[in-house]
Image (cartoon, rainbow, N blue to C red):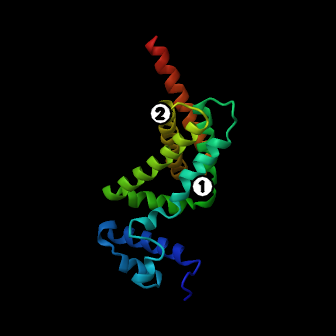
Amino acid sequence: MARWDPGTEERLTKAALELYREHGYDSVTVTRIAERAGITRRSYFRYFPDKREVLFAGSERLPAAAADAVLAADRSAPPLTAALDGIARAGARLTSYVDVGHATERRAVIDSSAELQERERTKLASVATAVSDALGRRGVDPGRADLVARIATVAFRSAFAQWIDARGELDFASCFSTVVTTLRETVVADIECGD
């Protein structure tokens, strides 16, 4: 087998998901994942630093993609619109590469482990930071940029969950549009109640 076989990362991810489903995340070792994927334990570490990161492969690219999309948004757009538009584009790009079945299995494994849930929150926090930084580069003051980025990231998370729940019946853009509509209706209703 070649040292950097292009299919190895996918085999490792598949093997890890299978083992996590069969035995639970805490009971699975790197060695078992590597063996199931047909490589050595040592080779495993050429792809991932630990057994947790096999579930988050590629997620390190999401913050930069989200930031780039926010920076590319219409310059005249208000901060929340720019952030939501950027996150919507980044999410659509992400879901075009992700198999919904894989995402469903991955979510089930993450939901079963406090450690993995914490890693997922860390990943989303890095997206929020990247969006906030992009808004800052657009001239938005730091406090507002941080708040807007957090709102946009929560919208992304909710839309991604809806996309998974729809199991391929809806595209990410439709799910995101539904979330943004709900967000706007909620804010307007709360403002009207406060008057």
Amino acid type assigned to the residue bearing label 2 in the image: Leu
Q: Is residue 13 above or below residue 71?
A: below
Determine whether, in the image, residue 62 is placed left or right of residue 31. right
Amino acid at circle 1: Leu
Residue drawn 53% across the image and 78% down it: 8
Label 1: state its secondary structure.
helix
Position of 81 relative to 125 (above/below):
above
Q: Nearer the viewer, residue 73 or 30?
A: 73
Q: Residue furthest left?
A: 27
Q: Residues within 10 Å of mark 1 (few under 14, many from 20)?
A: some
How far from the left and from the top, in percent, is residue 126? 47, 49
Residue 116, visible in the rendered structure: yes
Residue at the spot of label 2: 147
Residue 94 at x, y = what percent? Answer: 59, 55
Horizontal and vertical percent position of residue 59: 51, 58
Q: What number is the disc on residue 94?
A: 1
Mark 2 closeness class: few <14, some 14–19, many ≥20 residues within 10 Å:
some
User: In this rendering, does residue 170 appear at all?
Assistant: no
Corner quadrant of residue 114: bottom left
| Disc 2 + disc 1, Cβ < 8 Å | no
Instruction: Name which residue lies at 59% across and 77% down.
Output: 6
Residue 47: x, y in percent? 48, 74
